Image (cartoon, helix red, strand yellow):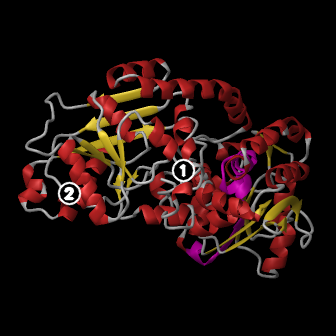
């Protein structure tokens, strides 16, 4: 890229002032703002990590490896050539539906975490917001419209054949989108009121069309508490997201991933064998030796059944391993009820599992029978949630017993997520076990007092809501009324009720 090199006290300067000098006032809600997403609305100086996310999550690990191998070539190419190479490797042969899933379920989380808070503050203050970018439109369109509320988006269009991308640019366009020409064509004589760009020459051409213009310099995009957009300031809550990668895949981070993979496969096999082979007391110790981190907080007083029925442990749901780690915390094996655990996960599970059908009457009979046999673990959210939110708790469990113990569960993945809504469910235990330092925190709370159960006059919904709030307060998570169906509609475009062969959880 070419840059304006006008000498100033701090080295180089552009023709336009820093974005920090842009003032905010009420009249901006009647103004039109134009900007790019690449290195402007986003802090990241390179779009490579986002192409890597598409290559890995929408394509395959092999495609991601080829994209990583292209890095030495990318470093010596100019911006346009670099973008064309990344587009070809990422999109050649990629299915349209796979890109739709990544755009809807994977990219929004990483976009949000990379938003420049100062730029977004100005961006959100404008009445009309326009984005013009050389980045493929399919990568940013969903996020900008669904989460940011952009009024108009123009980006580079990609060529398609049937249900696949070819990796080439659309024949209906003149190649990579030229921003200043696109702005001229769209706005005509009605010049944009505000423009935000970078120091790049092409951006200065675009900014020259605006009545008021600012640039994002290096200091404005550096990662700091002042540039990171806080979660509470997200224009729309990010409750659901999918994908396997738990880190931002920069070239160095992606290289570390591929170097770690051979060791990760061996380590995952070892961890799975430890959990299957040894009793809870020994498993917990051996897992720590492999680098797993877990913290257990269990009341000193032993929780035991009061009457014929066993104790029902009610957990929030982070991964399929929640019941296993609770068993490790309690130092005994307890039966867990599941909805759509993969056959492979059931096969290697160190504790007994019982599959529910989502038929309320049938499931009630199953849980009743299991409680008569002993203690039981249930996750009434019905599906996992990675973010700091709790989904609505099903009230079925509260109708079957008053012997209820809430359990607060939290976990953290450093490299891979062990849950998926649109991927292969049988790989969940492998991905989870491949994390270098997987973290789990189990807090067993006091047994629910009689007056907070149905035996104390509460309805089953009141009991479920009470436990949800109690766990939310304990974890610092926000309670929602969203359900499994809401999750799958967002992430996979279906209601989550699928055939056993392709079940997700």
Look at 63% across and 70% down and name the residue there: 150
Query: Measured along the vertical axis of the image, is residue 364 above or below residue 434?
Result: below
Determine if the magenta segment contains residue 37. Answer: yes
Q: Position of residue 118 (x, y in %)?
A: 59, 54
Extent of the magenta region: 27-55
Look at 34% across and 25% down and name the residue there: 280
Q: Position of residue 302 (x, y in %)?
A: 15, 30
Q: Position of residue 278 (x, y in %)?
A: 39, 22
Query: Measured along the vertical axis of the image, is residue 145 above or below residue 217?
Result: below
- Asked whether the viewer can see residue 83, the reply is yes
Tell me the quarter of the picture where residue 356 sits. Answer: bottom left
Tell me the quarter of the picture where residue 179 sits. Answer: bottom right
> Would you say 34 lies left or right of 175 here?
left
Look at 27% across and 54% down and name the residue there: 366
Look at 79% across and 51% down and name the residue there: 90
Q: Position of residue 439 (x, y in %)?
A: 44, 32
Numbered label tally: 2
Seen from the viewer's position, the closer of residues 258 and 343 is 343
Give the mark nearest the N terminus, 2 or 1.
2
To which residue does mark 2 refer?
Answer: 398
To which residue does mark 1 refer?
Answer: 420
Q: CA distance from mark 2 to mark 1?
A: 28 Å
> Would you say 504 lies left or right of 43 here?
left
Mark 2 neighbour density, 10 Å: few (under 14) some (14–19) many (20 or more)? many
Determine if the magenta segment contains residue 44. Answer: yes
Q: Secondary structure at mark 1?
A: loop
């Amino acid at each position: 890229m070419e840059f304006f090199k006008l000498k100033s006290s701090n080295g180089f300067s552009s023709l336009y002032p820093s974005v920090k000098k842009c003032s905010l006032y009420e009249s901006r809600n009647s103004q039109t703002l134009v900007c790019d997403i690449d290195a402007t609305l986003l802090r990241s100086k390179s779009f490579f990590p986002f192409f890597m996310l598409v290559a890995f999550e929408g394509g395959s690990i092999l495609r991601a490896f080829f994209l990583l191998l292209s890095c030495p070539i990318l470093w010596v190419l100019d911006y346009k050539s670099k973008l064309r190479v990344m587009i070809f490797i990422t999109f050649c042969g990629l299915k349209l539906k796979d890109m739709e899933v990544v755009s809807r379920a994977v990219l929004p989380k990483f976009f949000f975490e990379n938003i420049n808070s100062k730029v977004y503050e100005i961006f959100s203050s404008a009445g009309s917001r326009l984005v013009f970018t050389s980045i493929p439109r399919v990568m940013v369109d969903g996020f900008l419209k669904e989460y940011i509320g952009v009024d108009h988006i123009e980006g580079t269009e990609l060529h398609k054949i049937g249900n696949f991308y070819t990796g080439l640019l659309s024949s209906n366009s003149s190649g990579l989108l030229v921003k200043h020409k696109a702005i001229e064509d769209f706005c005509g004589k009605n010049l944009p009121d505000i423009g935000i760009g970078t120091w790049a020459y092409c951006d200065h051409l675009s900014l020259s069309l605006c009545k008021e213009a600012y640039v994002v310099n290096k200091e404005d995009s550096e990662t700091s508490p002042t540039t990171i957009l806080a979660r509470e300031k997200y224009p729309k809550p990010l409750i659901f997201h999918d994908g396997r990668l738990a880190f931002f895949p920069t070239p160095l981070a992606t290289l570390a991933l591929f170097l770690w993979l051979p060791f990760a496969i061996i380590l995952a096999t070892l961890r799975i064998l430890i959990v299957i082979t040894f009793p809870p007391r020994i498993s917990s110790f051996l897992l720590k030796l492999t680098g797993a981190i877990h913290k257990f907080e269990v009341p000193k007083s032993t929780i035991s059944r009061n009457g014929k029925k066993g104790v029902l442990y009610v957990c929030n749901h982070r991964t399929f391993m929640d019941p296993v780690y609770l068993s490790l915390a309690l130092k005994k094996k307890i039966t867990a009820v599941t909805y759509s655990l993969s056959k492979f996960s059931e096969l290697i599970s160190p504790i007994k599992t019982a599959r529910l059908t989502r038929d309320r009457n049938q499931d009630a009979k199953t849980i009743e029978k299991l409680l008569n046999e002993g203690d039981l673990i249930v996750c009434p959210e019905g599906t996992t949630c990675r973010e700091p939110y709790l989904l609505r708790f099903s009230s079925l469990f509260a109708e079957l017993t008053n012997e209820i113990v809430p359990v607060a569960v939290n976990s953290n993945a450093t490299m891979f997520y062990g849950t998926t809504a649109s991927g292969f469910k049988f790989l969940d235990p492998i991905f989870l076990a491949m994390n270098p330092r997987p973290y789990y925190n189990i807090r067993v709370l006091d047994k629910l007092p009689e007056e907070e159960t149905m035996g104390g006059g509460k309805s089953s919904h009141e009991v479920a809501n009470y436990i949800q709030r109690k766990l939310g307060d304990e974890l610092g998570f926000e309670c929602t009324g969203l359900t499994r169906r809401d999750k799958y509609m967002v992430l996979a475009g279906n209601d989550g009720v699928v055939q056993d062969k392709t079940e997700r959880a």
